[in-house]
Image (cartoon, helix red, strand yellow):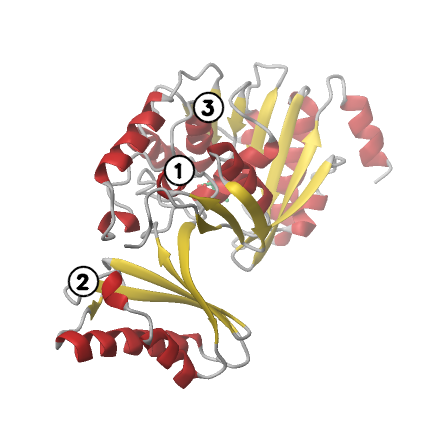
Amino acid sequence: MIFNNNKYEKIIVKTFHGLEETLAREIEELGGKEVRTEIRMVSFRGNKELMYKANLALRTALRVLLPFKTFNSRHPDNLYRQVKNIDWSEFFSAQKTFAIDSVVNSKYFPHSKFASLKVKDAIVDQFREKTGKRPSIDTENPDVRISLHIADSVCTLSFDASGDSLHKRNYRLEKTRAPLNETLAAGLILLSGWRGDKLFLDPMCGSGTFSIEAAMIAKNIPPQISRKSFGFFKWKDFDWKLWEKVFAEAKSNIVEKTCLISASDISKKSIEIAKGNIKRAGLSGDINISAADISNLTIDSDEGTAIINPPYGERLKEENIFKLYREIGDKLKKDFSGFDVWIFSANKEALKHIGLRTSRRLTLFNGQLETKFHKYEMYRGSKKVSKSITDSG
Ligand SMILES: C[S@@+](CC[C@H](N)C(=O)[O-])C[C@H]1O[C@@H](n2cnc3c(N)ncnc32)[C@H](O)[C@@H]1O
């Protein structure tokens, strides 16, 4: 038995650095207890039902883990012995496949692969000695995914309840050049404060990630509504009835969207790709999409939220990328009065060429890449204000 039905266990949810607080709020809204943030993760206490809900409904989660063993170890042989002391037959049989994912930050275990190998050997050896059979390794689609985390000498073993990473929502089968991770896109929308209450613009939409995530937020559609399987489906104690109840409840909470969501991009090819993704997400009737250069975009509203993810400029000459960011700034001054505009970019120099004062500056990490999420509040009649800000630098 991995999870006792009514027991409250410690559950860990992984996310991007910079989204921890947003994820913590989501977990609280689901009903998580003792919610605590750490770097790239949030822990809470919850029962099996909440663990199922977390996998289905958390927009800013990458993985949901169930830690089941923590111990101290300073040597690979000792790690092997301690892992072998766990009765693995309690959790799965020799007929199953498994995989170990490791995150190791320890002077005692300088090579994370070697630490995973020790854990794998200990599990396989135990099964072989007890039953004469051994479970096989399958790194792609294992029956049981085990996560090994070592910080200094503290080793934690967890079962991975998600299986495939939760950023995969099944709609983005086609990608443009630099698509944003779906979990990150949803997190940025939640950070912006937009909740489906007013117009949402995604004027450099690429593969359409922001608009699709925005429409799912507006309609309260769980991000994993199309997923066929989670890691916990293959656990010994999987409760199909409970899962069906959780799923049906989430589906019944989907609402009609009341606001307008518009996506556009200069590239016709991106628009075709985005349309395909929007269709797969079942949101064709919910998102207006067209090809347009941001400079020529017609804005018919005097309020709304825009999230812009411009190219970072890896493939462009510096003067061209600076020019593009200047054009974005000029357009915002000219036509976005009344809007909250957020720009997400890893190019700090280019961001200076927007030429407007930021009202919030957030830093996030897309893997190792430091990225900025800047807010510009475009007050009505702000042309003069913007000009004086630009003039004074
Ligand atoms: C970093 S990508 C956006 C990725 C997108 N967030 C996604 O998840 O797929 C930047 C996009 O800006 C578009 N773009 C570049 N210049 C533009 C312009 N002047 N007007 C509108 N879109 C532009 C590119 O075609 C590209 O799709």
Type of residue at label 2?
Lys
Q: SS at mark 3?
A: helix
| Secondary structure at numbered mark 2 | loop
Task: Determine which quarter of the picture holds residue 188.
Answer: top right
On screen, 104 above or below 187?
below
Q: Are marks 2 and 3 in contact (CB under 8 Å)?
A: no
Q: Residue at x 35, y 79 (%)?
A: 118
Badge number at residue 96: 2
> Does ligand 1 reach within 8 Å of label 1's beta carbon?
yes
Task: Locate residue 215: give its quadrant.
Answer: top left
Position of the N terminus by quadrant: bottom left
Q: Which mark is residue 218?
A: 3
Does the residue at mark 1 contact the one at mark 3 (Cβ under 8 Å)? no
Nearer the N terminus, badge 2 or badge 1? Answer: 2
Tell me the residue that label 1 is attached to: 270
Where residue 314 sits in the image (x, y, percent)? 54, 55
At x 26%, y 60%, the residue is: 91
Foreground label between 1 and 3? 3
Q: Label 1 amino acid?
A: Ser
Instruction: Work out whether 363 lies above or below 290.
Output: below
> In the figure, 77 relative to 318: above or below?
below
Q: How far, Cα to Cα, is label 2 from label 1?
A: 42 Å
Extreme residue in the right direction: 392
Which sits earlier in the primary sequence, circle 1 or circle 3? 3
Kindly report the distance in space between the C-alpha atoms of the residues bearing marks 1 and 3: 23 Å
Q: Position of residue 96 (x, y in %)?
A: 18, 62
Viewer-proximal residue, 6 or 233?
6
